[in-house]
Amino acid sequence: MGIPTIIVAALSPVVRQNGAPRAVAPLVPMGANAGEPNNPEMQKGIVVDALKQLVEIDTPGKIVPLPYEYIAKV
Amino acid sequence: MALTTIKGLQSEIYVPITPEPVWAPVKKELSEMTVALVTAAGVHLKSDKRFNLAGDFTYRDVPGDTPTEELMVSHGGYDNADVNKDINCMFPIDRLRELAEEGFIKAVAPIHFGFMGGGGDQQKFREETGPEIARRLKEAEVDAVLLTAG
């Protein structure tokens, strides 16, 4: 028996293409998938929601958008 | 209309093939789960060997009790600025520890894994690195894995 997984993705089309079984997609740039640096509140929200979706997603390949947004200042 | 004009003709352009998702069912409550992190973000111990930025299918162990200040990233495929400020934005180990303390999950796994995604030898990743990491996670009796990649 395998181990259930959930992926936190910045680029959801890439995750879809690679056949990830369960995914969540906050609005973040690649490199800050789990949220803004030094923003533990956002990071914790993303981790908690990702783990909840690990349990809730019942369709292989489903990607659930998450309501967190971080725009990196480049 | 015949669609085939020359038999056996193949396009020179490679098209990615989307594999069928591999599905492992959830069999426990979150509060009963030991959770591990696995990341393609190139996370490893500062004392460990850096990844080869030109492509690297190897992986690094990150023990569950590693302080975050002992972690770093070597990855040539994305802007490391955020993760250099706070490793938790790709490897949220401190958040996972808080969730274990609060009882939201049962425990932080004794072992986590980092590798460098975004390229490299895909066959090696698929046939060697991936199965080896899965085997190690099984050995550590991990119930669920949170991945960051893509």
Image (cartoon, helix red, strand yellow):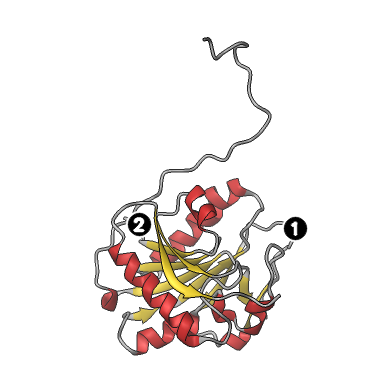
Secondary structure of residue under mark 2: loop
Q: Is residue B48 visible?
A: yes
The residue lying toward the viewer, choosing from B18 and B61, is: B18
> Residue B115's x, y, as percent?
59, 64
Does B94 sit above or below residue B49?
below
Q: In which quarter of the image is residue B7?
A: top right
Categorize mark 2 by other alpha carbons within 10 Å: few (<14), some (14-19), many (20+): some
Residue at 31% in and 53% down: A59
The image position of residue A41, as x and y in percent, is 46, 86
Q: Mark 1 points at which residue?
A: B54
Choose top left, top right, bottom left or bottom right for residue B88. Answer: bottom right
Using residue B146 as the reference point, say whether residue B124 is left or right of it: right
Q: Where is residue A4 in the image (x, y as percent from the top left)?
A: 35, 61
- Whether residue B64 appears in this view of the structure is no
Provide the chain ID for the residue under circle 2.
A
Q: How crowded is mark 1: few (under 14 residues within 10 Å), some or many (20 or more)?
A: few
Indicate the amino acid at tag 1: Ala
Q: Residue at x 57, y 68 (%)?
A: B114
Say above or below: B22 vs B61: above
Mark 2, residue position: A2
B18 relative to B34, above or below: above
> In this rendering, do the residues under marks 1 and 2 share a single chain?
no
